[in-house]
Image: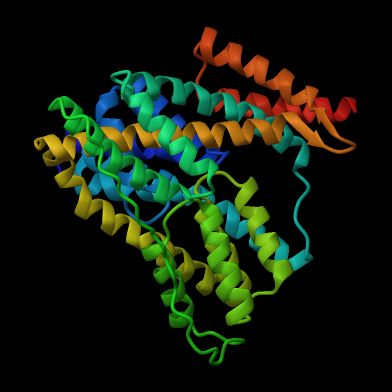
Amino acid sequence: MTGDLKQRLVSLASVFLKLGVIGFGGPAAHIAMMEAEVVRDRQWLQRSQFLDLLGATNLIPGPNSTEMAIHVGYVYGGVWGLIVAGISFIFPAVTITAILAIIYTQFGSLPQIAPLLSGIKPAVIVVIFGALYRLAKKAIKKRKFWLIILLVAILLLLGLNEVVSLLLGGLLGMFWLTLTESNTMTIPLVAFLVSSNIDQAANQESLNPSLWQLGLFFLKIGTVLFGSGYVLIAFLEGELVNQYGWLTQQQLLDAIAIGQFTPGPVLSTATFIGYVILGIPGAIIATLGIFLPSFVFVLAVNPIIGKLRQSKWTASFLDAVNVSAVAIMGWVTFNLLYQTLLIPKDGFLFNWEAILIIIVAGVAIFKYTINAAWVVLGGGLMGWVLSINN
């Protein structure tokens, strides 16, 4: 291993350990922070490369932000970089989740961190919006790209999930961009359904699963999981609670809560569930099972991303997928903003504390270009201080 590679691996570990510690807010926020770190600040990747990786990540199963970390690691440090970046990003979330699982099983309750979360969430929204603005400027190359954004927005409004919307946006956008470049105004209509169904197996010895049964379950989830963390919740509800009975409804709700307020990938919920079911060995095997497929998928897909740009059709598909990913990121940001600014109590009341934090974070991000990590931590501090005054 050369000295230059060792230095790159150290840099990757440093960046992604930090992102793993302060990565609150879900995949959109994680990707926003990665873009700021590896594109804007360190220039390890060009923004066009980052968008291509983002588009490819959205087309394979697994947690998007974790796979983006693995992609960046592979581009910057080869196979060793892939391993170091992925493990560094996952490790803090898994460790924190495991500690909370131990506390949970010992005391039967979760620590009260609502004041910090009330400040972190608005700050994260500003971080996401900053990355969305930068990525949109790069992805929306021509006015005709707005038609793809409109299409994806309509699909999302109709209730289609993110993966179906992304694929439809990519395919229809590919035909639209390629044929209009050829002065052909015909737009073929493409319609299809994408569904991921897990086979309903017989409930055998469900109350006392073995380690290999638990590991195979989470390996299967990691292999077929498309979409957001809410898809993960649907799988867990359908199998762990209703079919196998390995988890109670309340334990599932507590596991989801842990995933929502810990940093890093939401799939660290698997660590919590594994510990509740089979202790430390269960936590380890569940974590390995759900994250391992992501490393394999990225290793297989990353080397061919550049070749996709050599064909007019696949290049148009990538452009369309990139624009679609920006549209979906915008959709997520809007929903987060709506849920954060309005309080559904006695009608809809504005959350003035959240608005104040958004204004302060916006000034920090857009005027003074303060690092996203400090903005997130500052938002949490503001939320805590404002809760004391109430």
Q: Is residue 297 above or below residue 155?
A: below
For the point 59% across and 63% down, which residue is it?
Answer: 272
Q: From where the camera sits, is residue 217 visible?
A: yes
Q: Between residue 87 and residue 241, name the one nearer to us.
A: 241
- Picture quarter containing residue 177? top left
For the point 73% across and 26% down, which residue is it?
Answer: 354
Q: Is residue 26 above or below residue 216?
A: above
Place of residue 369 in the rendered image (x, y in percent of width and height, measured from the top left): 49, 13
Report the side of 230 relative to 143 (left or right): right
Place of residue 166 in the rendered image (x, y in percent of width and height, measured from the top left): 38, 44
Q: Residue furthest front?
A: 186
Report the side of 148 relative to 341 (left or right): left
Place of residue 176 in the rendered image (x, y in percent of width and height, measured from the top left): 25, 33
Give the quadrant of the C terminus: top right
Give the quadrant of the N terminus: top left
Q: Residue furthest top?
A: 367
For the point 27% across and 56% down, which residue is it?
Answer: 297
Place of residue 291 in the rendered image (x, y in percent of width and height, measured from the top left): 40, 59
For the point 67% across and 26% down, which residue is it?
Answer: 379
